[in-house]
Image (cartoon, helix red, strand yellow):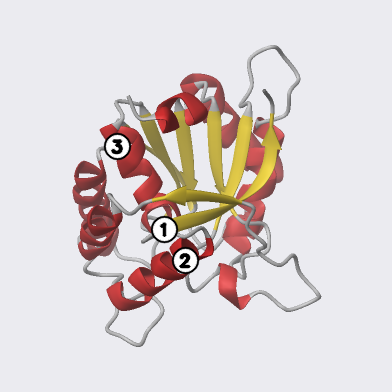
Amino acid sequence: MDSIAQRFGRTLVIAPHPDDEVLGAGGLIARLADAGQDTFVAVITKGQPPAFTEASVAAVRDEARAAHAILGVTETLWLDQPAAELSEVPHMQLNAAIGETVRTIRPDTLVLPFLGDIHLDHQLIFNSAMVAARPRQADYPRQVLAYECLSETNWNAPYLTPGFLPNVFVDISATLERKLEAMQAFKSQLQPAPNERSLEALRALAILRGATIHRAAAEAFVNIRQVS
């Protein structure tokens, strides 16, 4: 068994919007699946009219299901909070939705969007997930990591908001192509190069992160908490 299964255990990846989980942790998800480890994805938001049509929302969810099948996700959970409107949602509501998901899944590892992302949904979801992950009882996530998301993490305001300074790297040399295949399933979200939401940009980032640890490809994370 790949030792990553023991290091991560039962894993829950929090995605503010469909495709964030692929951009930030698709290689990790595939590697955990290959190692026989249960991995869950919680998609927090859902597009609401008039900004999003029912047809467009359904199409993106179909894309997400296809992507998750490629990666080997055990189960996808849809929390249906309003996309791009979380600032209007009572914080208690978001806390409760994510908290219930964490209590139901009982992950050993929780993987979150980064607090410094430019999208406010990402910031609010990070904070609510940290509330859910508080060690207030014996059963809580022992490992909490934050991932980087192209077009969000890289557009923070230098010196004014937290910078993404990774200190955890996961070798995805064997699963990079699956990550890219999963992203390709998101036809409505994928853009041609040199857009940062292109397959070329995603591959380039993986190669860069891999070179940092002398590997062919990697995903990078910030370690928020680790209990051994």
Between 73 and 216, the residue placed more toward the observer is 216
Locate the C terminus and report the quarter of the image it occupies.
top right
Left or right of 108? Residue 41 is left
Q: What residue would you read off at disc 1?
A: 215
Residue found at x 71% / y 78%: 157
Q: CA distance from mark 2 to mark 3?
A: 27 Å
Looking at this rendering, what residue extends furthest in the right direction? 160
Residue found at x 64% / y 52%: 167
Q: CA distance from mark 1 to mark 2?
A: 6 Å
Residue 87, position in %: x, y?
Answer: 65, 59
3 vs 1, front mark: 1
Residue 68, position in %: x, y?
Answer: 26, 45
Q: Quadrant of residue 41?
A: top left
Q: Are marks 2 and 3 in contact (CB under 8 Å)?
A: no
Query: Dot 3 surroundings within 10 Å: few (below 14), some, or many (20 or more)?
Result: many
Q: What residue would you read off at disc 3?
A: 73
Query: Dot 1 surroundings within 10 Å: few (below 14), some, or many (20 or more)?
Result: some
Q: Quadrant of residue 55?
A: bottom left
Q: Is residue 105 visible?
A: yes
Q: Is residue 44 above or below residue 119?
A: above
Residue found at x 39% / y 63%: 49
Q: What residue would you read off at disc 2?
A: 211
The local secondary structure at tag 1 comes to loop
Q: Are marks 3 and 1 in contact (CB under 8 Å)?
A: no
2 vs 3, front mark: 2
Mark 1 is on which residue type? Arg
Q: Is residue 47 visible?
A: no
Left or right of 113? Residue 181 is left
Q: CA distance from mark 3 to mark 1?
A: 25 Å
Mark 3 is on which residue type? Val
Residue 117, position in %: x, y?
Answer: 62, 65
The local secondary structure at tag 3 comes to loop
